[in-house]
Image: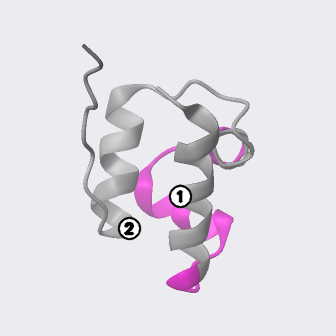
Amino acid sequence: MDIKKIGETVKERRKFLKITQEDLAEISGISERTLRDIEKGSANPELASLMKLCEVLGLELSIDVIK
């Protein structure tokens, strides 16, 4: 899992939707600190958190398998 890429995607989509970090944290039920860390790529988010963020931001969560 590329946590930097995940963070960039979350941040870009949040800004595109004109949602503040504070509002996204409240809507998604995760802490502002966790959201900031996810966006910076310094957190390894739990699957439940990623799923909730994707739901709120209108993104799809996919799994890439390398063979």
* Vertical position of residue 19 compared to residue 48: above or below: below
Q: Are marks 2 and 1 in contact (CB under 8 Å)?
A: yes
Quadrant housing residue 14: bottom right
Answer few, some or many: residues within 10 Å of disc 1's Cα (few below 14, many 20 plus, some between 14 and 19). Answer: many
Q: Is residue 10 left or right of residue 61?
A: right
Q: Earlier in the sequence, mark 2 or mark 1?
A: 1
Horizontal and vertical percent for residue 51?
30, 43
Residue at position x 53%, y 64% from top?
24
Residue at position x 54%, y 31% from top?
2
Amino acid under label 1?
Answer: Val
Horizontal and vertical percent for residue 40?
75, 45
Magenta-span inclusion, residue 34: yes
Amino acid under label 2?
Answer: Leu
| Secondary structure category for the residue under label 2 | helix
Quadrant location, the C terminus: top left
Quadrant housing residue 15: bottom right
Q: Which residue in the protein does label 2 denote?
A: 57
Horizontal and vertical percent for residue 16?
54, 83
Residue at position x 32%, y 32% from top?
48
Answer few, some or many: residues within 10 Å of disc 2's Cα (few below 14, many 20 plus, some between 14 and 19). Answer: some
Residue at position x 31%, y 62% from top?
59
Horizontal and vertical percent for residue 17?
50, 84
Q: Which residue in the protein does label 1 denote?
A: 10
- Residue 24's label in the rendered image is none
- Front one among 43 and 65: 65
Q: Main secondary structure of the magenta part?
A: helix
Q: Is residue 45 left or right of residue 62?
A: right
* Vertical position of residue 39 compared to residue 16: above or below: above
| Model colouring | one colour
Q: What range is drawn magenta here? A: 16-35
